[in-house]
Image: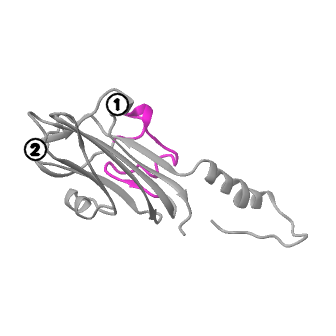
Amino acid sequence: MDIKTWANGELIAPADMKKYVSDALKGFLEPPACRRTMANAGSEQLAPGWHVVKLERPGSGYGAGHSYDTTGGLMSKEQTKIHAPIDGLYEVSAGLIIRAVSGSLPYVVGSVNKNASTGGTIGATGFLRFGHGRATAGEKVGAGSTTIPLKAGEYIAMAFNADAAAYVGEGAYAQMISHLELRWIGVMP
């Protein structure tokens, strides 16, 4: 965003007011933000190890009422990523429900990373890692959040590691929706 100052007596045109005042205020009142949920992937049974989480388009799937993209799709243009549309500080929020294909699920960890697209890379160097607690013997639930700087075009992606065959589980209830969210909260220091 450009910073504009006006000299005494300088004419302020309507285009200047839009660019330097109303557009800037809109940015603060309606910041770029995207929250995406995961499909019920019970049919996609994954072997033990790191796996990238696939995201639903905003407004679809079980999480339809709990997902959005305030940029009209700029942030949600790829299935496994959320892109930053402008430079700034972003709040990242993530939550995962992982279910065992059968039996128990002893260990699960989730990870979010920037500019990484493979499960192992997201997991090994993720800026946000969170463990999962036991909901039932075959289901683990975990969540985390943090603030990070991103430049326009950079992205975040999420992966999980389970030590038994598993899948991303969902429920029809808001509190049981796996999600990944990216929200602009301010300029970089």
Residue corresponding to mark 2: 164
Q: Tell me which colouring the rendered structure shows.
A: one colour
Seen from this angle, which residue lies furthest right? 9
Residue at (34, 35) in percent of width and height: 177
Q: Position of residue 187 (x, y in %)?
A: 56, 64
Binning the other alpha carbons within 10 Å of mark 1 as few (below 14), some (14 to 19) or many (20 upward) gives: many
Quick one: SS at disc 2?
loop
Residue 127 in percent (x, y) is at: 33, 61
Q: Are marks 1 and 2 in contact (CB under 8 Å)?
A: no
Q: Quadrant of the N terminus?
A: bottom right
Q: Nearer the viewer, residue 44 or 183?
A: 183
**For numbered disc 1, what is the local secondary structure?**
loop
- The answer to whether 168 appears left or right of 35 in the picture is left
Q: Amino acid at mark 1?
A: Tyr
When asked about the image quadrant of residue 122, the answer is bottom left
Mark drawn on residue 128: none
At x 77%, y 70%, the residue is: 5
Residue 76 forms part of the magenta stretch: yes
Does 162 lie within the magenta span? no
Q: Position of residue 4 (x, y in %)?
A: 73, 69
Q: Amino acid at mark 2?
A: Ala
Residue range (magenta): 56-84
Image coordinates of residue 85 in percent, x first then y, are 49, 58
Residue 5 lies, with reference to residue 159, above or below; the image says: below
* In this rendering, position of residue 70 left or right of residue 56: right
Between residues 107 and 85, which one lies in front from this camera angle?
107
The residues tagged by marks 1 and 2 sit, at their Cα atoms, a distance apart of 25 Å
187 relative to 57, above or below:
below
Image quarter of residue 126: bottom left
In this rendering, does residue 61 appear at all? Answer: no
Q: Residue furthest bottom?
A: 7
Mark 1 = which residue? Answer: 62
